[in-house]
Image (cartoon, grey):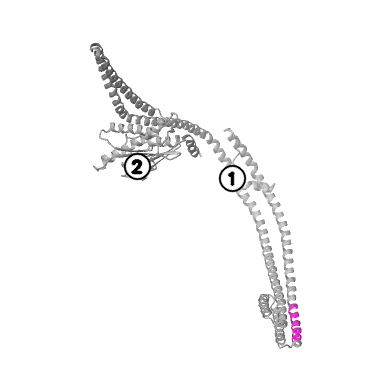
Amino acid sequence: MAVAHVMARLTIRTRLIVLSSALLFVLIGTNFYLDRELAENSAGMVKAAELLGVIEEANSAQIAFGEMRYWMTDLAVSLLMLSERNAHAARARMEQDLDLLARRRPRAVAAVRGELAQFEQLAHKAVEEYTADHRVIGNSLLAQASEHGVAVNRLLAASVAELTHEAVAARERVVAGAAAATRVSRIVVSAAVLVGAILTLLVLRSIAVPLNRLVVAMNRLNAGDLAVSIPAAGPDEIGAMAHTLAAFRDTLGALRKLIDEQRERERELRAAHDQLKAAQANLVQAEKMASLGQLTAGIAHEIKNPLNFVNNFAELSRELLGELKEAVESAPGGTRAEDLDELMTTLDGNLAKIAEHGRRADGIVKSMLLHSRGGSGERRQSDLNALIEEALNLAFHGARAQDQNFNVTLERDLDPSISPLEAVPQDLTRVFLNLFGNAFYAVNKRRREGGDPAFAPMLTLTTRNRGDEIEVRVRDNGTGIPPEIRDKLFQPFFTTKPTGEGTGLGLSISYDIVVQEHGGSIAVDSRPGEFTEFTLRLPRNPTAAAATVATGASA
């Protein structure tokens, strides 16, 4: 209890330092002891390994000497050069092994070399006697050499036995030391665990109880109980936490009011965001109506000609009806039928022309209405070349209505092999109107500002059948597009035109129609001061292509 009381008066940091220091002291002592024992064991293992290496060298020397004895004996008997070479090779290997063995057993090696010299001397003399065909003397010399050979083997075997005994002793010392170190380490570790457990229990008890009280208070605060009682602040870190928790409780009410104000602002931001989306939709509709307004003059010009034909032929038909009436009333019977037939033929032709130009005016009005209905039209088989011609005609007359001096050379290279394409025709017409309008604007700007009287504005249209898709190229020789803004062309509200001349939505809407709605692609190539070319690729099966584009965008 006294220890617990003392612990309670210390700060948590001090308690943990005491606990950690005690455990660290035990671990350092244990580690020091184990390191020392490990070093001694390692040295013993190294010594044993060295002894095993020396034993291997001694064995190798003994084997090499055995080969040397064999080949020297064979040389004395057979006098073959092969035996002499093999004997020299065995002698060289033996000398290498003896050099290594001499580091550990210099005296034994010196004795071996002495006996080996005697063996070699007698063996060579035996070879000479056998060569001279003195076989009795040769046999006697070989017998004497054999005695020295036995002495060499005995010396080497004795070295191997001594070294083996030393290696076994070294290994036994290592094993005994490791066993002792293991026993001591177990005792030390057990004592450290016991002391650590006691100290840890005391420290945890002095920390857990007040911490538990703080946890209860924090849980009630999390539940929204601002009247919760906070434990009294003590001298340690838990007391500081209690003081902080009390301050947190006092400020939580103020924070709630901040949160309510933030939620109100979020509601206002959501409303503003909804208003912004509505304004964006209105801007898109405004762009559509603006482009429609720009075409109004051109459409009026297109309608004016068929209406003039209708009015003129209607007036002429009225006059013919008067002539027909007079002819019926006053003409003699012999000529009435012929005159009536001529007047009826002329009148029929006039009525046919009235009907033809009436249909032409009706088609122009229908095109205008389709363009004004937006992108919710249904897909149907559409003649792409006809859509391009229609949009080009409307865009040209719209440009002429804005500037009577405007003129441009139109070059068409429309592939007649293009079969009808499944598309929303009014939306593709809007795309072509945007591209043609931008092209007319660019060539007219270069004409006005370029200062080149020989400049001739030109727009080139090309369509090609590419199998599963149709390619459309729109190229003008206008002002061109700088490289630094080329990547921004299809961004909403981006425009290079002066304020009041463009909304920046034309190409953005065109991109959505071609890519998102029809599953195609649109790319631009340009060189400032020379040309701009837009390339559209429209798939023949836009439903599947658009689904693929949508899947890729969502991924």
Q: Nearer the viewer, residue 481 or 269?
A: 481
Q: Residue at x 51, y 35 (%)?
A: 255
- Alpha carbon separation for disc pair 1 and 2: 74 Å
Name the residue that disc number 2 marks: 532
Circle 2 crowding by C-alpha within 10 Å: few under 14, some 14–19, many from 20: many
Asked if the stretch drawn in magenta spans residue 147, the answer is yes
Classify residue 503 by image quadrant: top left
Amino acid marked by disc 2: Thr
Number of the label disc, if any, that sits on residue 237:
1
Q: What is the quadrant of residue 191 in the picture?
A: bottom right
Is 193 above or below relative to 278? Answer: below
* Residue 476: x %, y % from top left: 33, 40
As helix, strand or loop, the secondary structure at mark 2 comes to strand
Q: Hey, which quadrant is residue 50 in on the image?
A: bottom right
Q: Please, is residue 447 above or below residue 340 in the view?
A: below
Q: Is residue 497 visible?
A: no
Q: Residues within 10 Å of mark 1 (few under 14, many from 20)?
A: some
Farthest residue toward the front? 334
